[in-house]
Image (spheres, helix red, strand yellow):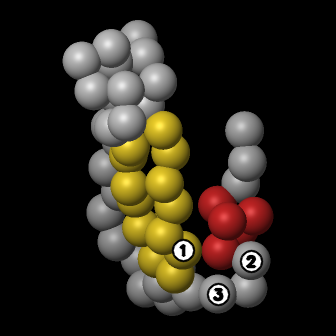
Amino acid sequence: MSKTQDYLNGDRNADLEFPITTWNHAPELKLKVRLTQSTSEGNSSTISFPT
């Protein structure tokens, strides 16, 4: 598992895309996420997907 800083690579934002290969009904479906680094504190959310 990679650290968030590995994806940011010195930038404040990173757009990532991951294939979702386990859903046969949509084999080309992808999860797109945007990471943003901020100097202020905020709330964080955790999302879990069933496997």
The front one of 46 and 32 is 32
> In the rendered view, would you say 19 is above or below 23?
below
Q: Classify 10 Å Cα crowding around label 1: few (below 14), some (14-19), many (20 and above).
A: some
- Quadrant containing the C terminus is top left
For disc 1, the marked residue is: 14
Q: Amino acid at mark 2?
A: Asn
Q: Circle 1 sits in a helix, a strand or a loop, which is it? A: strand
Q: In whole angstroms, how far apart are the C-alphas of marks 2 and 1?
A: 8 Å
Q: Tag 3: residue type?
A: Asp
User: Which residue occupies 27% across, 27% down?
Assistant: 26
Q: Are marks 2 and 1 in contact (CB under 8 Å)?
A: yes
Determine whether 47 is above or below 39 in the image.
above
- How far apart marks 3 and 2 lie (CA) works out to 6 Å
Labels 3 & 2 near each other (Cβ < 8 A): yes
> For the residue carrying disc 3, how many other residues have a C-alpha within 10 Å: few (<14), some (14-19), or many (20+)?
few
- Residue at 40% of width from left, 59% of height from top? 33
**Is residue 10 shown above or below 15?**
below
The earlier-in-sequence mark between 2 and 1 is: 2
Residue under label 2, please give it: 9
| Residue, disc 3 | 11
Distance from the alpha carbon under mark 1 to that under mark 3 = 7 Å
- Residue 30: image location, x then y, percent: 38, 43
| Secondary structure type for disc 3 | loop
- Picture coordinates of residue 32 (x, y %)? 38, 55
Amino acid marked by disc 1 = Ala
Q: Secondary structure at mark 2?
A: loop
Residue 20 location, quadrant: top left
- Name the residue located 42 percent from the left edge and 67 percent from the top edge: 34
